[in-house]
Image: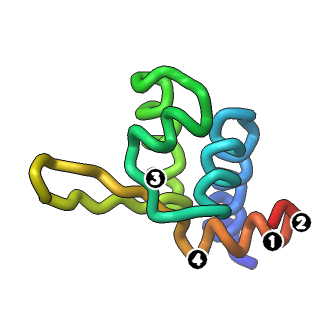
Amino acid sequence: MSIQEVREKLKVYRALDNEIRLRILLTLSKESPLAFSDIVRRVGVEKGLLAYHIGVLKSVGLVECRYERHSSKLSKYWLTDKARKVLKELNLI
């Protein structure tokens, strides 16, 4: 494994070292995609805090987002394959 690969893994594990981010990932592992407002309700945190933590997860490639337009703009979030692999390695799913 190269030094760059080790650094990338460390970034992912640092992102997982937070209870809120783990709750987000576990919530999405059970049901996804989910709208931002649904994640707020299920995880039980304020919108601003959730937005910050989802941003961290997106930055390391664990969560993806798509914007869908129906009657209004709606963001949907889901786990990446990378996230599923990491959660399985840690026996969390």
Q: In the depicted view, which residue is nearer to us: 52 or 46?
A: 46
Q: Disc 3 to disc 2, how far (Cα)? A: 21 Å
User: Is the C terminus in the top left, top right, bottom left or bottom right quadrant?
Assistant: bottom right
Q: What residue lies at 39% left-to-right and 43% top-to-bottom?
A: 36
Q: In the depicted view, which residue is nearer to us: 58 or 9?
A: 58
Quarter-wise, where is residue 45 in the image? top right
User: Compared to 82, does 30 lie above or below?
Assistant: above
* Type of amino acid at the residue the image marks with label 4: Asp
Determine the secondary structure under disc 1. Answer: helix
* Type of amino acid at the residue the image marks with label 2: Asn
Q: In the depicted view, which residue is nearer to us: 11 or 58?
A: 58
Viewer-nearest of discs 1 and 3: 1
**Mark 1 — residue?**
88
Determine the secondary structure under disc 4. Answer: helix
Q: Disc 1 to disc 2, how far (Cα)? A: 5 Å
**Mark 3 — residue?**
58
Q: Disc 2 to disc 4, how far (Cα)? A: 15 Å
Determine the secondary structure under disc 3. Answer: helix
* Type of amino acid at the residue the image marks with label 3: Lys
* Type of amino acid at the residue the image marks with label 1: Lys
Q: What residue lies at 20% left-to-right and 61% top-to-bottom?
A: 68
- Residue 16 coordinates in the image, percent (x, y): 71, 46
Viewer-nearest of discs 3 and 2: 2
**Mark 4 — residue?**
81
- Whether residues under marks 2 and 4 lie with C-beta atoms below 8 angstroms apart, the answer is no
**Mark 2 — residue?**
91
- Residue 53 coordinates in the image, percent (x, y): 52, 36
- Whether residues under marks 1 and 2 lie with C-beta atoms below 8 angstroms apart, the answer is yes
Q: Disc 1 to disc 4, how far (Cα)? A: 11 Å
